[in-house]
Amino acid sequence: MSSNAPSSDQDEIICDCSGTTRGKILQLIARGDDNLDRIESVTGANTGCGSCESEIIKILENPD
Ligand code: FES
């Protein structure tokens, strides 16, 4: 039930390089951009140091 997730969780920065939050990634997944390529090109996440990739994949696999 992502709608009930605490806002602090949504505001968590997943990708420091691009400032991409968990909420932003969940928003993209919800509108159908549910793969790493799309998330990268829309947000710029995982296009810097790359250390956030596993975290993004985790959210993709389990968007709750
Ligand atoms: S933290 Fe995401 S590319 Fe560096």
Image: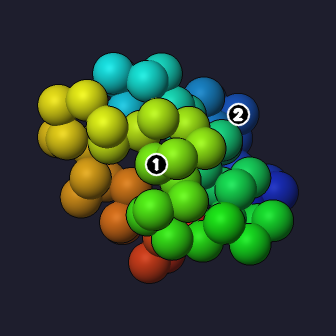
47 on left or right of 3:
left
Q: Give the residue displayed 52% in from the left and 47% down from the top.
A: 41
Ranked by sequence position, the earlier of labels 2 and 1 is: 2
Under circle 2, the secondary element is helix
Dividing the picture into quarters, in which one does residue 9 lie? top right
For label 2, the residue is: 7
Tell me which amino acid carries mark 2.
Answer: Ser
Residue labelled with disc 1: 40
Q: Is residue 39 left or right of residue 7?
A: left
Image quadrant in which the N terminus is located: bottom right
Q: Identify which residue, 22 or 46, lies in the foreground.
A: 46
Q: Is mark 2 within 8 Å of ligand 1?
A: no
Return the residue nearer the eye: 63 or 19.
Answer: 19
Residue at point 31% right, 37% down?
A: 47
From the top left corner, tell me how far across and down residue 56 is, in percent: 39, 56
Q: In the figure, is residue 54 to the left or right of 9?
A: left
Of residue 7 and residue 61, the one placed in the foreground of this image is 61
Which residue shows up at 34% across the image and 23% down it?
16
Q: Is residue 23 above or below residue 64?
A: above
Tell us which disc is closer to us: 2 or 1. Answer: 1
At label 2, counting other C-alpha atoms closer than 10 Å, the crowd grade (few under 14, some 14-19, many 20 or more) is few
| Residue at disc 1, secondary structure | helix
Amino acid of disc 1: Glu
Residue 31: give x, y in percent of width and height: 81, 65
Indicate whether 39 appears above or below 51: below
Q: Please, is residue 58 above or below residue 13 in the view?
A: below
Percent position of residue 27, x then y? 74, 52
Q: Nearer the viewer, residue 11 or 54?
A: 54
Image quadrant where one finds the C terminus: bottom right
The image position of residue 35, as x and y in percent, is 51, 71
Confirm or deny contact between disc 2 and disc 1 (CB under 8 A): no
